[in-house]
Amino acid sequence: MSSGTHHPAPILPVEQRVAALEALLTERGLVPEGFIEQITRRYESEIGPMNGAKVVARAWADPEYKMRLLADGTAAIAELGFGGPEGDHMVVVENTTAVHNVIVCTLCSCYPWPVLGLPPAWYKDPPYRARMVREPRALLAEMGCPLPEEVEIRVWDSSAEVRYLVLPQRPPATEGMTETQLAALVTRDAMIGVARL
Amino acid sequence: MTTPLCLSGLDLPRRNGELAFDAPWQSTVFALAAAVIEHAFGGDREPFRQQLITAIAAEPGRPYWESWTAALEALVPTLPE
């Protein structure tokens, strides 16, 4: 069958399709000079999990900040200077000894950009998106994060309305650490909820 | 499969860091969508997001940035004048 699909097979390699889009959108005045370079640079070097790590470290170090963070994630994250696209409605969910949180986007790839940067490849892949909802305990174990049966797993499906960030548990024996030292302990995967610290 | 990043001036390592883009066309098409969202839709991400959901659902096994490209192609005819 050569027909039967609503989408004609792409004739051009994807690089050429993107070049065509760039030419078209530039002609329509939607791509200011230097815009592509600026966005790329920002997401490759300025926006990433190191931002979220600072938020987590502050919450560990400052109980009042943590309360604000859990009450209004967007506002508390903005206190540290982080915000913007895909960070408009941030909800921070706290891991405890009894509860483990993990984030997913079942429909596409929604993710809290201002604090985690762009999502890793596996986050966007169908197996993760489907299985984290269907069998989170098994998938977490496969990803190197086995959880005791008594720990409740809460899976948060990101959407256009809400982006989630996991607040990991503070590791033991870190009482004397500075915020900077604490931030260095925080990993991207722990803030997604596929790892524990 | 982590690639060390050069992050001069940042005191925090990018844990589990990996490059967001594997090829220049990927960062270009990412930025083009950002441009359309910002300059054609006044910051409203939802029209693009709906196209992305549709594109991913149409071919779940297709590489992510190719679905992103297909979504942007589908969005172009609907751009507000």
Image (spheres, coloured by chain):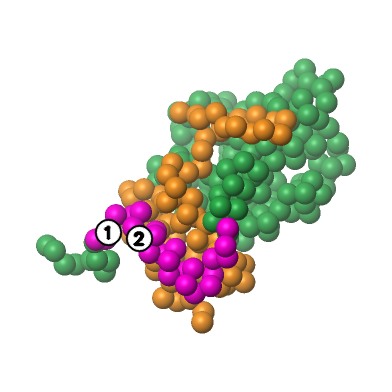
Chain colours: A green, B orange
Residue name at image x 81 percent, y 30 percent:
A179
In the rendered structure, find residue A17 and report the number of the disc placed on it: 2
- Sequence-earlier tag: 1 or 2: 1
The stretch of residues the image draws in magenta is A10-34
| Residue A87 rendering spot, x and y as whole percentages | 66, 54
Residue type at the position of mark 1? Leu
In the rendered structure, find residue A12 and report the number of the disc placed on it: 1
**Residue A164 seen in the current view:** no
SS for callout 2: helix
**Nearer to us in this view, B49 or B9:** B9
Residue name at image x 62 percent, y 41 percent:
A45
Q: Is residue A23 magenta?
A: yes
| Residue A85 rendering spot, x and y as whole percentages | 63, 57
SS for callout 1: loop
**Nearer to us in this view, A178 or A153:** A178
Residue at the left extreme? A1
Residue name at image x 47 percent, y 44 percent:
B21
| Residue A12 rendering spot, x and y as whole percentages | 27, 59
Residue type at the position of mark 2? Arg
Do the residues bearing badges 1 and 2 touch, measured as CB atoms within 8 Å?
yes
**Residue A62 seen in the current view:** yes
Q: Chain of mark 1?
A: A
Mark 1: few, some, or many residues within 10 Å (few <14, many ≥20)? few
Separation of marks 1 and 2 at Cα, in angstroms: 6 Å
The image shows residue A32, relative to residue A179, as above or below, that is: below
Q: Chain of mark 2?
A: A
Q: Is residue A79 magenta?
A: no
